[in-house]
Amino acid sequence: MVRPIYLDNHATTPVDPRVAAIVLRFFLEDFGNAGSADHIIGDHADAALSVARNHVAALLGSLPDDVIFTSGATESISLALQGFVAARLRRTKRPPRIALTAVEHSAVLETVKALTAAGRASSVVLPVDRSARLDLDELARVVRSGVDLLCVMGANNEVGTVYPLVEIGRIAEASGTLFLCDATQAAGKVQLSIDSSAISFTAISAHKMYGPMGVGALIVRDRRDLEPVSWGGQQQHGLRPGTLNVPGIVGLGEACRLRRLEMVADEAAIALFRDQLQYALSSEIDGLIINGAHGERLAGNLHVSIPDVPNGAIIARVRERLAIATGAACASGIEAPSHVLRAMRLPTSIQDGALRIGVGKFNTQAEISEASELLVRAVGDARKAMVA
Ligand code: PLP
């Protein structure tokens, strides 16, 4: 089988071979438990965690001691939201009010929904415009009306819109509101500074930045804002107990180190490929629409709609040769309308014809040209089949 061209880098990224090499070493040779204080194999694992913590902190502009390793962004978000609500309830005896954007990842949306349904929090949803951008005046108005925690993602995982975190952090800080940023898609792609954006909780995941799946981090500025949601060990200040995934964490650290060194050059090259593909598709496919905020998009994001051709008809024609998506990668396999496109109030035909393309650093010029040819042909064939 010829491996399809991979243009679904928002769902996951291939692991950088340099990251894979170091992960393998920690599986096979340096396999100690970081909690084994009685021998140097344990000491070695513990030292590797410190190195990884430094790399994560350096990429994100935080203190190394603020980094809590998790199994990925979903767990980081869950710990932040549940742990924050527990801490607030204990301190103030009233359910905190959470403001969140309508286009957050389901890890945020569903956790807030569950906390609200249980009577442990109340929530207010911030609308977006047709490019998934936020109205910062409206956000400031809502924050000033009394919000305990504001949730705004760093970049959207469907249409790639990037959010102005420094301004948003300033608004939150001015009202004493804590700020949770799901930076899963933004970390390692755009410059982030937890410190200058005054972000209280930051969630990241290694597999979106050329690291392994199943490992991530939550960066917590002030641990007094968080209570544990699981118990049974003293690891990581008791906030995320359990034996640490040393090989995965080392991989996350190495991925962050490489992103810090290479991100600017890589993202510039990725943007050129994306623009080339966008130009080719717009010139060759009548009626093609580019979704999202054109000037404020992730470099690798190209989200398009062909309103007269359902996206399934295109995917069916290319799926063995080209890996692209109709929307966010979903765990259930059940197709549901995208909450992001609905929040953008796009017409149904645009939602039904939507395709998410994610360019990454391992894509080549030849792949971009071939992907464009495959898509143009698939749209032509689908249109012919529809009139036949
Ligand atoms: N948040 C965003 C914006 C995402 O894109 C994803 C993954 O698709 C997640 C959270 C969940 O990340 P993880 O797969 O590490 O649990």
Image: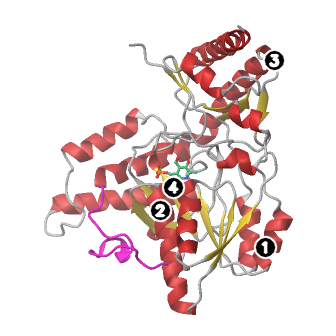
x and y, in percent, of residue 215 in the image:
39, 52
Point out the tag, 3 or 1, that comes first from the N-terminus: 1
Determine whether 65 is above or below 249 in the image: below
Quick check: is the Cβ at mark 2 less than 8 Å away from ligand 1? yes
Distance (Cα) linking label 1 and label 4 = 26 Å
Q: Residues within 10 Å of mark 4 (few under 14, many from 20)?
A: many
Mark 2 and mark 4 in contact? Answer it, CB < 8 Å.
yes
* Amino acid under disc 3: Asp
Q: Quadrant of the N terminus?
A: top left
Mark 3 and mark 4 in contact? Answer it, CB < 8 Å.
no
Residue designated by label 4 = 204
Q: Nearer the viewer, residue 229 or 353?
A: 353
x and y, in percent, of residue 313 in the image:
62, 21
Quick check: is the Cβ at mark 3 less than 8 Å away from ligand 1? no
Q: Residues within 10 Å of mark 3 (few under 14, many from 20)?
A: few
Task: Write down the region rendered in magenta.
Answer: 226-245
Nearer to us: label 3 or label 4:
3
Residue 25 in the figure: left or right of residue 216: left
Distance (Cα) linking label 2 and label 1 = 25 Å
